[in-house]
Each structure stands twice: as C-alpha cells, then as structure tokens.
Image: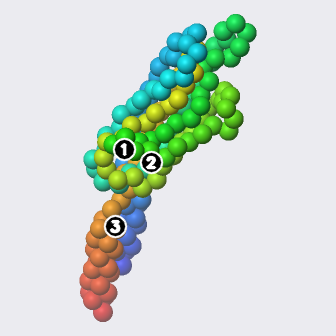
Amino acid sequence: MKVSTFVNAFALASALAFSGAASATTTTFSGHDVIGITEARTEKIDISYLGGSFNLTGVLDPVFTVLNGANTGLFFGATLEVDGDELFTWAPQSIFNLSRFTFSASNLAAGNYTLKFNLLGGGDYTGSYTITAVPEPETNALMLVGLGLIGFIARRKSA
C-alpha cells in the first residue's frame, strides 16, 4: 500500500471516528398530575452528569384531560437549576400551552442539576431528555497533532 493511500485512509477514518466521538444518552420520563387539583405543582427530575461539559435537549408531551368542560393539565414552564440556583428558564408560547414543549441548554459544566416542570392538575405527561457530551479542547488538539505527525512522516518517506 502506498504511504499516501494509507495516510488518506487514516485521515478519513479519524475524521469519521472523531465526528461521532460525542456520546448521547436519552432518558424518558412520565407522570400523572391529579385531576381536580387547582393548584400548580412542580415535577422535579434530577440529572447528574460528571463526565465534563454537556448539552441538554428535551421534550415534554402533555396529554390533557377535560374536567367539567375545561382543559386541565396545563403546562406553565420549565427551569433548570444547579444547587438551587436557576440557570435557564423556558416558557411556553402561551400560558395555555396544550402541545409539545421543547427545551435545550448548551455547554453545561459537569454536576448535579434539577429539571423542573410547572404543571396544573389534570393530565398525564411523557417526555425525554438527551445529554450529549461536548468534546474537550484537549481532545481536538491531540487529534490534530497526531494527524500532523502522520502527515510529516508520510511526506518524509515519499521524499
């Protein structure tokens, strides 16, 4: 095999492997907000990630019921907290959000988080969130140095 063919194949394999290096983990959740409760309540989901920086994306799907001719199970918003401090707040398009709700936060530090959904009684809900690892800059630098050394060696051998 020619050195240049090997280098091209290695560079392509490295780029493909590197592009898929960020791992993703999806977690699903569901619950029921009791029909007839007229006070809003908060559903809490604890998220712990200790592997470095990460991105969080997710969705909440409310399934509404009708009580006395009125929709219940309304969703009023969500927050992401770390150690009791709010980092992000997401609000629905209208106060009577009756549809799928998506949320995301980028480049979060490793740690223990709490995701909170503010609900008003009367509906089931399902949802999921995905944690995607953010590659560290050192990983990128190490890969580039390695590819540079392989290119340097291939050039010396072909000269």
Q: Secondary structure at mark 2?
A: strand
Number of the front mark, 3 or 1? 1
Mark 2: which amino acid?
Leu
Residue 121: x and y in percent read 56, 17
Q: Work out which quarter of the rendered image holds the N terminus and state it.
A: bottom left
Farthest front residue in view: 39
CB atoms at circles 2 and 1 under 8 Å apart?
A: yes
Which of the two discs, 2 and 1, labels the residue nearer the N terminus? 1
Crowd around label 1: few <14 · some 14–19 · many ≥20 (10 Å): some
- Which of the 4 image quarters holds residue 15? bottom left
User: How far apart are the two marked residues, 2 and 1, measured between alpha carbons?
Assistant: 7 Å
Identify the residue under disc 2.
Answer: 87
Q: Residue at x 30, y 92 (%)?
A: 159
Q: How is the image coloured?
A: rainbow
Residue 33 visible in this rendered orientation of the protein? yes
Mark 1: which amino acid?
Val
Q: Residue at x 40, y 45 (%)?
A: 85
What is the number of the mark on residue 137? Answer: 3
- With 57 as the anchor, is 140 left or right in this view? left
Q: Secondary structure at mark 1?
A: strand
Which of the two discs, 3 and 2, labels the residue nearer the N terminus? 2
